[in-house]
């Protein structure tokens, strides 16, 4: 898939309550005429106008016409939308690629996989690929896939699965977050955070009170450290 360079445009709300887009320098690039405006993703932004959702290009023109009851940002080449009271997935041309069913919600695609949830007497969850093929999984929640794994949970126990739905890192944690730069943040108890690697080893022991994803060996600051840490657990800066 071709990488899209995102426009340097950011949604903002005017004093009159309408949304538009401006540059990092604060200049208005798309006039405030939307009821809601989401961030640009993969070259398009979901906006609501006249109570219908569509997608605009950086120039402000509608690339996908307003015809949805709800819309989320593009992810992995597809966007989740509500059409005729059903969640579905559309491509950048606005064509429905995967049609949803009544009573289901669809998550964002990442690494070729999304989640589908049905809310009956019991919540049921599937993994779905771009061809619409489903794999039932026995979990209450599945997060975004990153580096081949996704955080998941069942009965308030958290771990990681692969794209087939197989548990790769046991559900031994009270919270988990997506992988970034080979490590994922985990909570072993409330207020005790560390990082695991792809093998499930605690690469950085749980000695932090707050953590974030690694970005170039520099995660957000921890509440128990003076600065960030490197992927080896050493203080950075």
Image (cartoon, helix red, strand yellow):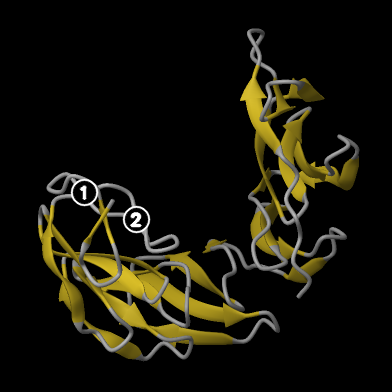
Q: Which residue is mark 2?
A: 219
Residue 223 quadrant: top left
The residue tagged 1 is 222
Q: Nearer the viewer, residue 62 or 198?
A: 198
| The image quarter in which residue 91 lies | bottom right
Given the current orientation, which residue lies at the most extreme front position? 237
Count of numbered marks? 2
- Give the residue drawn at x 75%, y 21%: 27
Name the spot of residue 224 as percent of width and height, x first: 12, 47
SS assignment at label 2: loop
Contact between marks 2 and 1 (CB within 8 A): the answer is yes
Give the class, few, some or many, for how many residues have Cα within 10 Å of label 1's Cα (few <14, many ≥20): some
Question: At which x and y percent is residue 149?
Answer: 42, 80
Identify whether 131 is placed above or below 185: below
**Image coords of residue 96 (percent x, y):** 79, 66
Position in image of residue 90 (x %, y %): 76, 63
Task: Look at 60% across and 63% down and name the residue there.
Answer: 102
Please rate how many residues cluster around mark 2, counting C-alpha atoms within 10 Å: few if below 14, some from 14 to 19, many from 20.
some
- Give left or right: position of 140 versus 150: left
Residue at 64% x, 14% y is 17
Q: Residue 87 occupies which quadrant of the picture?
A: bottom right
In the foreground, 139 or 112? 112
84 lies left or right of 175: right
Question: What is the C-alpha distance between the residues marked 2 and 1?
Answer: 9 Å
Q: Quadrant of the N terminus?
A: bottom right
**Residue 105 or residue 8, whichever sits in front:** 8
Describe the element under mark 1 as helix, strand or loop. loop
Q: Which mark is residue 51?
A: none
């Amino acid at each position: 898939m071709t990488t899209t360079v995102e426009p340097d445009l950011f949604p903002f709300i005017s004093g009159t309550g309408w949304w538009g887009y401006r540059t990092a320098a604060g200049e208005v690039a798309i006039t405030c005429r939307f009821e809601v405006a989401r961030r640009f993703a993969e070259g398009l932004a979901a906006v609501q106008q006249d109570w219908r959702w569509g997608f605009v290009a950086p120039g402000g023109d509608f690339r996908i016409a307003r015809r949805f009851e709800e819309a989320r940002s593009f992810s992995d080449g597809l966007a989740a939308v509500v059409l005729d009271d059903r969640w579905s997935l559309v491509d950048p041309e606005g064509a429905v690629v995967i049609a949803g069913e009544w009573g289901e919600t669809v998550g964002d695609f990442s690494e070729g996989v999304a989640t589908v949830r049905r809310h009956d007497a019991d919540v049921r969850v599937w993994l779905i690929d771009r061809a619409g093929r489903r794999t039932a999984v026995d979990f209450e929640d599945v997060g975004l896939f990153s580096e081949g794994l996704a955080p998941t949970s069942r009965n308030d126990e958290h771990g990681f699965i692969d794209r087939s739905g197989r548990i790769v890192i046991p559900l031994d944690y009270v919270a988990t977050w997506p992988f970034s730069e080979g490590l994922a943040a985990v909570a072993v108890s409330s207020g005790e955070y560390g990082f695991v690697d792809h093998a499930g080893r605690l690469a950085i022991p749980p000695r932090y009170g707050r953590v974030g994803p690694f970005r170039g060996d520099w995660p957000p600051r921890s509440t128990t450290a003076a600065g960030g840490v490197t992927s080896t657990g050493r203080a950075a800066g």
